Amino acid sequence: IFLNMSEIVSKLEQFQSSTPSHWREKALIRQQNNTWIRYSQNIALKMLDKMEELHLTQKQLAERMGCSQQYISKVLRGQENLSIETMAKIEIVLNIQIFC
């Protein structure tokens, strides 16, 4: 079965989302914040390693830090802009070094 270009476009439009994806804007933000994202990922990896060593769940860590499990989840995904206070709490609660 051969379709002409207008038929192909018509078929594709049937599956087109009604809301924009914003993928280009998100990709630009990731490019512009690459250094910060890498730093955030390194913190998350240190946290995950120590949590595994201590057999700590996200919920248990959240209780020790006085925050929600959802917040810890965002931190561990590298989606949270951490304050110096929060990084200090992480260092104390997990006994790890974030600041060099």
Image (spheres, rainbow, N blue to C red):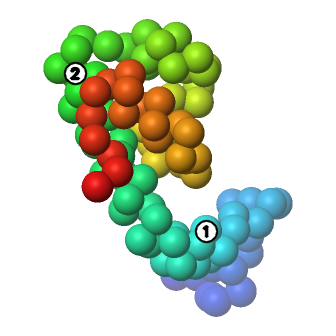
Task: Write down the residue under mark 2.
Answer: 52
- Residue found at x 69% / y 68%: 22
Q: Nearer the viewer, mark 1 or mark 2?
A: 2
- Residue found at x 69% / y 80%: 9
Describe residue 86's horizontal placement relative to residue 7 as left or right: left
Visible residue check, residue 17: yes
Above or below — where is 84 with respect to 27? above
Visible residue check, residue 1: no
| Residue nearest the viewer, comparing 55 with 91 | 91
**The C terminus, quarter of image:** bottom left
Describe residue 86's horizontal placement relative to residue 46 as left or right: right
Task: Write down the residue under mark 1.
Answer: 26
Q: Residue 88 carries which label?
A: none
The quarter of the picture where residue 21 lies is bottom right
Q: What element carries label 1?
A: helix
Q: Tell me residue 84's x, y (percent).
A: 53, 46
Describe residue 49's horizontal placement relative to residue 19 as left or right: left
Q: Hey, what amino acid is under mark 2?
A: Glu
The quarter of the picture where residue 69 lies is top right
| Residue nearest the viewer, comparing 28 with 54 | 54
Above or below — where is 86 with respect to 67? below
